[in-house]
Amino acid sequence: MTVAVTRNTPDRFNGFLASCMHDIAPGVYVAPRMKKAVRERLWTVMLDWSELLPSDGGVVLFWKSRTAPSGLGMRFVGWPKKELVEHEGVWLTVRALTAQHDVEELMELEDPEEPEVAPDDPILWTADAQESGPSE
């Protein structure tokens, strides 16, 4: 299965993709069986037209691949402006922390303090103690 997702692309991109793939939702195109040569030609056309993309526009193409991380081959032109890295056979998205991230809160989550537990806490009862209740 090959999937293409577009964002803010000129009509020429959408028309071309719709001519060789199923248009299943706005900006989403799928082809259940697409040969590698057809996929490569499709991608060459997308790259040739890439100068027509606005700064917030782009195309993502992905397909099943036995050799790629996560079994997923991917190509991007324009958006999304994210860095994908392969780690232990899986694709991961890398994003920098922004002002929206509370760095101090993240640091606290890294080393959480264990709460104090009362001696009569039922969680601490052993199997024998549960039968008779908390020890006194």
Image: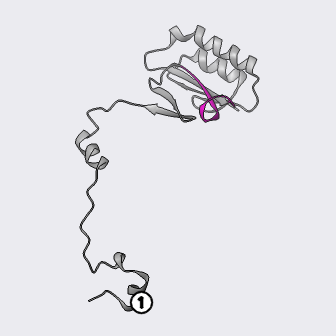
Q: Quadrant of residue 117?
A: bottom left
| CA neighbours of label 1 inside 10 A, class few (<14), some (14 to 19), many (20+) | few
Query: Residue 18 appears at what percent x and percent y?
Result: 67, 23
* Residue wearing tag 1: 131
Residue 20 in the magenta stretch? The answer is no
* Relative height, residue 81 to residue 109 (above, below): above
Q: Nearer the viewer, residue 115 or 39?
A: 115
Q: Residue at x 59, y 26 (%)?
A: 74
Q: Please state if 109 lies on the left or on the right of 22 as rendered.
A: left
Could you tell me which quadrant the N terminus lies in? top right
Is residue 3 shown to the viewer in this render? no
Q: Please state if 118 lies on the left or on the right of 22 as rendered.
A: left
Q: Residue at x 54, y 11 (%)?
A: 50
Q: Give the extent of the magenta segment.
A: 65-76
Q: Amino acid at mark 1?
A: Glu
Query: Residue 134 appears at what percent x and percent y?
Result: 32, 86
